[in-house]
Image (tube, rainbow, N blue to C red):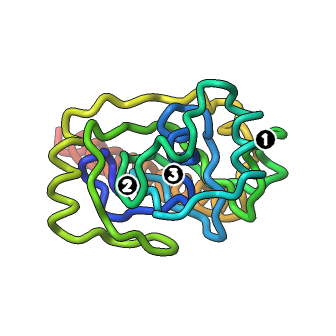
């Protein structure tokens, strides 16, 4: 996935502008999805719909008075980008109020567009139209990045998939170092025999 906000190629849509606002303001550091998102940058789109009144009250209870009213926020637009750093299960999220799962994608950073860009959203991850990407990327190049403190979530035990990947990388590195050392010693021994 993308390694910088302006390189993002896919977007995800939030149902409710307050959710998008909470992510971009650094309050909501977990994005719950039915899929494990790969680490990287994604564009953040606010759909045309809104959460019900009960959900909006719950958001206000978590975020506080700083949370703008749903009606005062833009809808049907790309509003910024978020950086997913890891995907966890709810029980691995240190009791976070944001964790409901089934997959809790940890948001390590975000950046906000100065001017939201109109776009038609979709379910899941989706690719914005080229014209939308062009307008969004032009703003993201210079957009300041807000870093979230998610260190407590990064200390969670590794998933089986992450353990397998870590072991594979460790084994590959060990074999590479062993081969390099063997070749170096062979070359040194050959050179010593010549003299």
Q: Residue at x 30, y 40 (%)?
A: 113
In the image, residue 87 above or below residue 121 = above
Name the image quarter holding the C terminus.
top left
Looking at marks 3 and 2 on the same chain, the residue that comes earlier in the sequence is marked by: 2
Asked which quadrant contains residue 125, the reply is bottom left
Residues under labels 3 and 2: Cα distance?
A: 37 Å
Residues under labels 2 and 1: Cα distance?
A: 24 Å
Looking at marks 2 and 1 on the same chain, the residue that comes earlier in the sequence is marked by: 2
**Which tag is nearer the camera, tag 3 or tag 2?**
2
In the image, residue 20 above or below residue 14 = above
Q: Residue at x 51, y 49 (%)?
A: 17
Dot label at residue 162? none
The residue sitting at the front extreme is 71
Question: Is disc 1 in contact with disc 3, using a CB cutoff of under 8 Å?
Answer: no
Q: Is residue 52 left or right of residue 191?
A: right
Name the image quarter holding the N terminus.
bottom left
Q: Is residue 127 left or right of residue 37?
A: left
Residue 120: x and y in percent read 35, 70
Residues under labels 1 and 3: Cα distance?
A: 41 Å
Question: Observer-nearest residue: 109 or 65?
Answer: 65
In the image, residue 22 above or below residue 16 = above
Q: Residue at x 79, y 48 (%)?
A: 92
Kindly state the secondary structure of the residue where label 3 is placed.
helix
Mark 1, residue position: 97
Kindly state the secondary structure of the residue where label 2 is placed.
strand
Asked which quadrant contains residue 75, the reply is bottom left
Question: Observer-nearest residue: 61 or 90?
Answer: 61
**Which tag is nearer the camera, tag 1 or tag 3?**
1
Structural crowding at the residue carrying mark 3, measured as other residues with C-alpha within 10 Å and reported as few (<14), some (14–19) or many (≥20): few
Residue 189: x and y in percent read 31, 45
Structural crowding at the residue carrying mark 2, measured as other residues with C-alpha within 10 Å and reported as few (<14), some (14–19) or many (≥20): many
Mark 2, residue position: 43
């Amino acid at each position: 996935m993308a390694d910088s906000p302006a390189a993002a190629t896919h977007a995800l849509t939030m149902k409710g502008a307050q959710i998008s606002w909470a992510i971009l303001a650094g309050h909501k550091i977990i994005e719950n999805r039915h899929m494990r998102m790969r680490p990287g940058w994604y564009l953040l789109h606010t759909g045309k719909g809104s959460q019900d009144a009960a959900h909006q009250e719950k958001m206000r209870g978590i975020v506080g008075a700083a949370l703008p009213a749903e009606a005062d926020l833009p809808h049907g637009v790309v509003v910024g980008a978020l950086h997913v750093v890891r995907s966890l299960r709810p029980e691995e999220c240190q009791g976070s109020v944001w964790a409901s799962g089934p997959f809790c994608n940890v948001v390590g950073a975000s950046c906000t567009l100065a001017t939201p860009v109109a776009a038609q959203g979709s379910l899941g991850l989706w690719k914005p139209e080229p014209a939308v990407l062009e307008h969004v990327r032009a703003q993201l190049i210079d957009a300041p990045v807000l870093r979230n403190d998610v260190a407590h979530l990064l200390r969670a035990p590794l998933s089986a998939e992450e353990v397998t990947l870590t072991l594979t990388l460790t084994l590959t590195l060990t074999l590479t170092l062993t081969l390099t050392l063997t070749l170096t010693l062979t070359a040194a021994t050959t050179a010593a025999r010549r003299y």
